[in-house]
Structures are given as C-alpha cells and as structure tokens.
Amino acid sequence: MSHFLYDAHAHLGTEDERRERAEKGIVTLLCGTCFQEIRKIEQLAGADGRLPSWLIPTYGLHPWHADKEQVEEFLPVLEQCSIIGEIGMDSVWCSVPLDIQEKVFVLQLEYASKAGKPVILHTKGQEEQIARLISRFPNTYLVHWYSAEYGLADYLKLDCYYTIGPDVWWNPAVRRTASQVPLDRLLIETDGLGAVSWANEAGGRYAEASGALSVEKTLLRSAAAIAEIRSVETENMLEILHQNFKAFLALGKLQP
Ligand SMILES: [Zn+2]
C-alpha cells in the first residue's frame, strides 16, 4: 500500500534529492534561511512563475545568519510565505552573539504572531530561553528535531507541533520526544539528506545497518520507529502523521 508522504522540514539539498521529492510527490516544507537560499528556491519556479507542486516554501532568518543580514531588510521576504522558519536561537553549533540572535528571532516572532503564520523553531541549546520568548507571542509553533534531554515540558504547555528527527531509530533523546508529545502533534522530517547522512553516521555506533540515503526510506523508517514507540501499527501511524500534517498546513491556510 502506498502512502501520502511528506517532509515537514528540509533544505534545498542536491538536485538528486529534489528530483526524488518531485518524482515521488513528497510534499516538502523547504526552508530558505537567508537571502541567498531564498533566491535559489525562487529559481526552482517554472516558466509560469510557480514553484513545483511538491514544494512549500518557509522562510526565516536562521540564527546562524543572524549577524550577516539585516533583519529589517529580511522581514518583507516573510510576506511571501504562509509558514515562517526555521528561526530560533543556537548556542551549540554557532557563535553568533546571543543578543543579536535574540533580536532577530523576536522581530520575526512578532511579525508571525501578528500575521497569524505558524513558526518552525530551531532551539539548539536555547530550549528554555526560546520557550520563554515564544510564550509572549501567541501562535502555533512547530518544534523542529527536539533533541534536548530537558525542557520539553515547557513546550508541551504551549501546545506545539513536533517534527521528529531522522535519528529517531537510535537517538534516546529524540525517542523520548516521540514518546512524550501528543499523538496529534507528531510530524516527520528529514532536515534534508545532508542531515540524514550525519545522523546515520552518528547512529552507526548503535546499529549496523543505518539504511540507504533516500528521502522516502528515511521518512518511512522514522514513521516505523515512532509507530513502535507509540505501540501503534505502522500503517495507522502513517495515517496519523498525514492527518497531523494536513492540520498543521491548514493553520497556514495551505493544503498538501
Ligand atoms: Zn533545518
């Protein structure tokens, strides 16, 4: 039986990766994290000026680029999409001063809350601070690849959605997220095949066969792992994940 498949968070990736998404009709929330990436996404539009049907753009000035671009210049770009992100803060993988990251993040949160556009969050190392900040801006939040050992309770209080990362088959912290969030708030993502490759290698320490590098196989492996964690048949979990995605897109007035 074939299923509707989607990827609730990914990046541009290679041409091969995009071809797989197109050929298999994997509806993808594709992130543009800086001006340069957004221009590349725009170039994927056809002669009619429309983006391919598998691609739903989500734009946001990423914390890694927070000191390279002017957020005031960036804000108008957000008007072009119905879902904002990924945005957030990061004290693990980036050295941009946190006060700059916070300013950029808060201005975008403010815009999204006023515009009623859901937000995809990048929370690495700043989980507690971000939970505090977003509680000031009523909105729907999607917490992307939550992998902290602590702090999830803050987000559960805010009724967020969660994309479970592609390492759910081995990473205990990600498995804990998958086990603790409400069933109707679960989504799946790859974060792009570059991230999957990295996560597979890390998982190699835990398992012999980490699986081939394909968007479809990665998503199906995640769905199966989440199904096992939640004691639900994989078929049923795929249907739950599909319904959750539809519900999330509806918040951005979009359809899969
Ligand atoms: Zn990402």
Image (cartoon, rainbow, N blue to C red):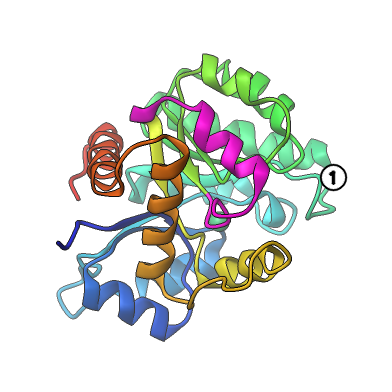
Packing grade of label 1 (10 A; few <14, some 14-19, many >=20) is some
Residue hosting label 1: 97
Q: Is residue 73 left or right of residue 221?
A: right
Q: Residue at 25% x, 65% y: name it.
A: 54
In the rendered image, residue 180 lying in the magenta stretch gets the answer: yes
Where residue 80 appears, as percent x and y from the top left, is 34, 51
| Kind of residue indicated by mark 1 | Pro
Q: Secondary structure at mark 1?
A: loop
Is 190 displayed left or right of 26 in the figure? right
Residue lying farthest bottom? Answer: 16
Of residue 5 and residue 45, the one placed in the foreground of this image is 5
Q: Position of residue 245 (x, y in %)?
A: 29, 42
Decide: is 76 above or below 64. above
Residue extent of the magenta highlight = 165-184
Look at 44% across and 65% down and name the residue there: 218
In this rendering, the answer to whether 227 lies above or below 117 is: below
Q: Nearer the viewer, residue 115 or 6?
A: 6
Viewer-proximal residue among 49 and 233: 233
73 relative position to 117: left or right: right
**Can see residue 45?**
no
**Image height check: is 235 above or below 28?**
above
